[in-house]
C-alpha cells in the first residue's frame, strides 16, 4: 500500500478542535478500529468474536542486532525501547486506537494554569479568556480533572461523583465525556472562588532560553501545572512500592548534566518544579512554559520512544553521594541496573545472553491484575497471556526462514525486503506455518551529513549529493517496491508533511554543475574533485558509516558509492557492529551516516532540529543550525492548536528540504512473518505498532514451549 498525499478523514479526526485558551476535550478522536488477526486466513469473523485468550507459552521473536542496554533514560536504541515498552508503565497512557489519554498508574490527574503578579507568588488556577490580550479572567484554585469512567459512580451534565472506592466525592463544573474517560473543569462550577480580572501589564515576567536565545514573556501560563494521584499497591519488580518520590528522582536524574540522557534532558528541560507529597501518593509538576506534549512527557507516555522514564529510587540510593551530582551521574551511567533492570510493568527482566538472546517473563505480581476488569481501558484481567518473551539474535535471514517453518522462532518483525520477496517465503510449505503481514510504517531513513566537516558546509554540495543518489533504483532493486521516497523529516501521511516541497531528482549532470559552481574540480586528473579551503587543497572524500544489522544497508551503500564516485567523489564505506555504530552517531564521530527516525502524526521537531540539541549526545547529530528553524521549533512547542502546529511543521519541512542537512531516502511498508497459531495480533497506527501483552497461542499444543 503506497501512502497517499490526500489525508483521509480518519487521519484528520486527529486534529482536535482547539478554542483558545482552554478547549473542552474533544470527543474521542477515534481512528478506524484496529481488528486483530485480519491477515491470518485461519481467523474468521466468527472465530474472532468467540475467541477467548489462553494463558501460557513462550513468544520467540527474531532480533537483528545486539541490544544496547535497558536503562530507560540512557538508551534511545529502538530494539531496547521495544523491550522497555513491555516492562514499564506510565502515570497516564494513550490509547493506541483513539489517541485519548487515560489514567494508568495514576488513578486521576489534574491540569491547571499558573499566574504570577509582579512581586507576588505563583498562583494555581484556571485562565478564562486570552492571556495574550490586555486582560483576562482568572479562577484561583480551579483545575481540570480526568478519571477513567470505571472510577465514577455518577456523571451528570455539570458534575461527577467518584465511586466509594475513591471516597465518593462530588465535583461540579463543565463535564466532557470521551471513550474511556470523563473530564471536569471546575472553573465552571457554580460554587467556586470568585474570579478575578488580571491586567497583563500587572504580571511578572519569566525568561526562557534556547541555546543562545532568550525570550521574556508575561507570567500567565496555560496548562503548565499537573498533579497525579498515584494508585496504592503498585510495586516495582523487586517488591518495593512505587511512589511519587520515584518520579521526582527520575526527573532529577534526567536533568543531571553528568547522566548520559541528553535526548530526554532536552524533552524535560521545561520542567520547572517537580515535587511529591510526603507520603508519595501525589506528584506535582510545574512547566516553565506551555508545551503541547507536556502531559504526555511528565505522565510518562513516551509513545514515540517506547517505555516510560520512571526508575526506582531505592535501587540507586542517591543520598549516598551527598548531593554530588557528578559522582552520582558517573556511578549512574555504569550502574548494573542497565543490565538487570527493575520496573513496574507486565513483564520483568529475566536474562540477557550477549550475542544470543534477551528474555523477559510475566510479572506474577502485576498490579493491574489486582483490579477488576474494565478498571484500565483495554486491559483484561489475566494479561499478559504469554509467560515469557525472548528476542533471539539472528543475523542471517535464511536461518530465520528455516526456524520459522520449524517452529524454533515465532515471529520476524524486521523482515528485510529481499526476504519478503524471495520465493522461499511465498511457498505453500512456508505459508502452512507462517502468515505474512504488512503495514505502512512511521519510519523514514536518511543520510546525515556532519555539518562540522568542511566539505559539507556548502548547501550546493549537499544538494549535489542528494542528486547523485539513485533512489528509484534502490527502491526497486533493494527494497523490492516496499519503499517510497520522502523529502522531509515528518511522517508522510501526517498533515505535518509538506507535499508542496519539490523533490530533488536523480540528476548527475545537474549535480556535477553544482559541484563545479561550488569550486570542486578534478585538478590533478586522479578522478577525485578538489578545492582549496583555508589555504590547503582538500579532496572531496568522506567516510560513509553503516551498521551490520541489515545486509541491504551494504547493498545501498555500494550503489551510492558507485554513483558518487562516477561524479568524482571518493566514498569509503565503514561498516560496524550496532553498538559501535550507535556510539559514532552519539559522539558525532562520522562524516556521513545512514540512520532512521520514527516519525509521528503530530511531531516535535525541536529535539532533532533546534541548534541547542547539537551538543554531543543530542539528537541533532549533524549539527544543523538555522535561526528560522530555531524560532519555529520553539513556537511549535507552545502552540496548543494542532492545525497551527502542522502549519509550522510544513514550514520547517520546506527549510530543511532546501538546506539538505540530510539526504532523505525512504518511508517503508513494514513487513512481518508470524506463526500461524498466534492470536490477538493487532497492527496499530503508531511508531511501535505491536503490543505483545495482547498476544496468545490458539493451539495449546503449540505454545512455543
Image: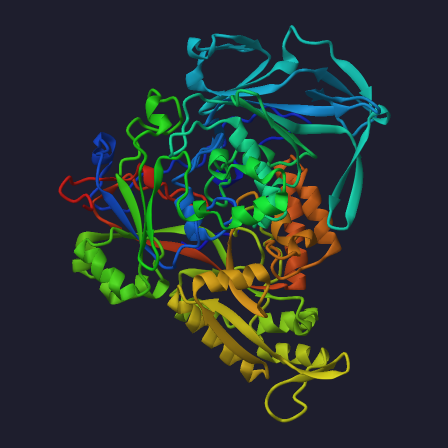
**Residue at the extreme bottom of the image, as rendered:** 525
Observer-nearest of 581 and 667: 581
Residue furthest left in the image: 701
Residue 3: where, in percent of width, then height? 46, 53
Closer to the camera in the image, 64 or 36: 64
Task: Please say if 17 is above or below 662.
Answer: above
- List the single residue furthest toward the top: 191
- The residue that appears at 36% across and 40% down in the rendered structure is 691
Quarter of the figure with residue 571: bottom right
Q: In x, y percent, where is residue 309?
A: 51, 39
- Name the side, left or right, on which 304 lies relative to 634: left
Count of number-bearing discs: 0
Q: Is residue 189 left or right of residue 391?
A: right
Residue drawn at the location 56% of the way across and 59% of the way down: 586
Is any atom of residue 496 visible in this view? no
Answer left or right for 567 relative to 53: right
The answer to whether residue 340 is visible is yes
Q: Quadrant of the N terminus?
A: bottom left
Res. 705 image quadrant: top left
Q: Residue furthest right?
A: 201
Q: Compared to 700, does 392 lie above or below?
A: below
When the figure is inspected, residue 434 is found, relative to residue 242, above or below; the finding is: below
x and y percent of residue 688 in the render?
43, 46
Residue 336 locus on image (x, y percent): 44, 47
Foreground of the two, 209 or 218: 209
**Left or right relative to 426: residue 104:** right
Please give the name of the residue rendered at 72% of the width and 57% of the height, measured from the top-left corner: 626
Colour scheme used in the picture? rainbow
Q: Quadrant of residue 163?
A: top left
Which residue is at 31% across, 64% downward?
419
Toward the viewer: 308 or 320? 320
Amino acid at each position: 500500500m503506497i501512502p497517499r498525499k490526500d489525508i483521509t478523514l480518519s487521519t484528520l479526526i486527529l486534529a482536535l478542535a482547539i478554542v483558545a485558551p482552554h478547549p473542552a476535550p474533544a470527543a474521542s478522536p477515534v481512528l478506524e478500529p484496529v481488528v486483530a488477526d485480519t491477515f491470518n486466513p485461519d481467523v474468521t469473523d466468527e472465530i474472532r468474536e468467540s475467541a477467548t485468550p489462553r494463558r501460557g507459552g513462550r513468544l520467540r521473536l527474531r532480533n537483528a542486532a545486539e541490544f544496547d542496554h535497558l536503562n530507560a533514560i540512557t538508551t534511545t536504541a529502538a530494539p531496547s525501547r521495544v523491550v522497555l515498552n513491555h516492562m514499564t508503565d506510565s502515570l497516564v497512557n494513550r490509547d493506541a486506537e483513539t489517541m485519548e489519554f487515560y489514567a494508568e498508574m495514576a488513578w486521576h490527574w489534574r491540569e491547571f494554569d499558573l499566574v504570577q503578579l509582579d512581586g507576588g507568588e505563583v498562583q494555581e488556577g484556571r485562565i478564562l479568556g486570552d492571556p495574550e490580550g490586555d486582560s483576562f479572567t482568572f479562577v484561583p484554585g480551579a483545575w481540570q480533572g480526568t478519571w477513567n469512567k470505571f472510577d465514577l459512580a455518577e456523571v451528570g451534565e455539570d458534575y461527577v461523583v467518584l465511586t466509594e472506592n475513591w471516597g465518593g466525592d462530588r465535583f461540579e463544573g463543565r463535564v466532557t465525556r470521551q471513550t474511556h474517560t470523563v473530564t471536569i473543569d471546575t472553573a465552571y462550577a457554580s460554587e467556586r472562588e470568585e474570579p478575578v480580572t488580571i491586567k497583563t501589564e500587572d504580571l511578572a515576567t519569566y525568561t526562557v532560553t534556547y541555546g543562545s536565545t532568550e525570550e521574556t514573556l508575561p507570567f500567565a501560563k496555560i496548562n503548565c501545572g499537573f498533579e497525579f494521584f498515584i494508585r496504592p499497591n503498585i510495586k516495582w519488580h523487586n517488591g518495593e512500592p512505587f511512589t511519587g518520590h520515584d518520579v521526582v528522582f527520575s526527573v532529577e536524574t534526567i536533568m543531571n548534566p553528568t547522566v548520559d540522557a541528553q535526548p530526554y534532558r532536552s524533552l524535560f528541560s521545561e520542567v520547572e518544579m517537580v515535587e511529591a507529597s510526603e507520603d508519595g501518593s501525589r506528584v506535582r509538576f510545574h512547566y516553565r512554559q506551555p508545551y503541547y506534549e507536556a502531559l504526555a512527557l511528565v505522565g510518562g507516555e513516551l509513545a514515540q520512544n517506547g517505555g516510560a522514564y520512571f526508575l526506582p529510587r531505592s535501587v540507586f540510593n542517591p543520598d549516598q553521594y551527598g548531593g554530588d551530582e557528578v559522582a552520582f551521574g558517573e556511578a549512574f551511567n555504569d550502574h548494573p541496573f542497565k543490565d538487570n533492570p527493575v520496573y513496574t510493568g507486565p513483564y520483568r527482566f529475566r536474562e540477557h545472553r550477549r550475542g544470543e538472546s534477551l528474555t523477559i517473563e510475566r510479572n506474577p505480581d502485576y498490579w493491574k491484575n489486582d483490579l477488576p476488569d474494565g478498571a484500565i481501558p483495554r486491559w483484561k484481567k489475566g494479561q499478559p497471556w504469554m509467560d515469557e518473551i525472548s528476542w533471539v539474535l539472528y543475523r542471517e535471514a535464511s536461518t530465520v526462514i528455516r526456524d520459522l517453518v520449524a517452529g524454533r522462532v515465532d515471529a520476524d518483525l524486521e523482515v528485510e525486503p529481499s526476504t519478503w520477496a524471495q520465493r522461499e517465503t511465498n511457498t505453500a510449505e512456508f505459508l502452512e506455518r507462517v502468515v505474512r503481514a504488512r503495514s505502512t510504517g512511521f519510519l523514514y531513513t536518511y543520510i546525515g551529513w556532519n555539518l562540522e566537516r568542511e566539505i559539507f558546509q556548502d548547501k550546493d554540495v549537499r544538494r549535489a549529493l542528494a542528486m547523485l543518489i539513485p533512489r528509484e533504483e534502490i527502491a526497486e532493486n533493494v527494497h523490492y517496491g516496499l519503499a517510497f521516497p520522502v523529502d522531509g523529516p515528518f511522517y508522510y501521511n501526517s498533515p505535518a508533511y509538506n507535499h508542496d516541497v519539490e523533490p530533488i531528482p536523480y540528476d548527475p549532470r545537474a549535480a556535477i554543475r553544482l559541484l563545479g559552481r561550488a569550486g570542486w574540480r578534478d585538478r590533478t586528473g586522479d578522478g577525485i574533485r578538489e578545492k582549496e579551503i583555508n589555504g590547503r587543497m582538500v579532496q572531496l572524500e568522506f567516510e560513509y558509516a553503516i551498521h551490520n544489522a541489515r545486509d541491504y544497508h551494504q547493498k545501498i551503500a555500494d550503489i551510492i558509492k558507485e554513483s558518487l564516485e562516477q561524479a568524482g567523489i571518493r566514498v569509503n564505506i565503514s561498516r560496524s557492529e550496532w553498538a559501535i555504530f550507535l556510539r559514532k552517531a552519539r559522539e558525532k564521530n562520522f562524516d556521513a551516516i545512514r540512520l532512521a527516525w520514527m516519525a509521528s502524526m503530530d511531531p516535535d521537531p525541536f529535539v532533532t532540529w533546534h541548534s541547542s540539541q547539537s551538543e554531543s549526545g543530542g539528537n541533532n547529530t549533524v549539527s544543523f543550525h538555522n535561526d528560522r528553524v530555531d524560532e519555529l521549533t520553539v513556537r511549535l512547542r507552545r502552540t496548543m492548536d494542532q492545525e497551527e502546529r502542522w502549519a509550522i511543521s510544513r514550514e520547517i519541512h520546506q527549510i530543511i528540504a532546501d538546506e539538505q542537512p540530510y539526504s532523505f531516502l525512504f518511508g517503508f511498508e513494514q513487513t512481518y512473518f508470524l506463526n500461524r497459531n498466534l492470536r490477538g495480533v493487532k497492527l496499530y497506527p503508531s511508531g511501535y505498532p505491536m503490543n505483545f501483552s495482547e498476544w496468545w497461542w490458539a493451539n495449546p499444543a503449540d505454545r512455543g514451549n
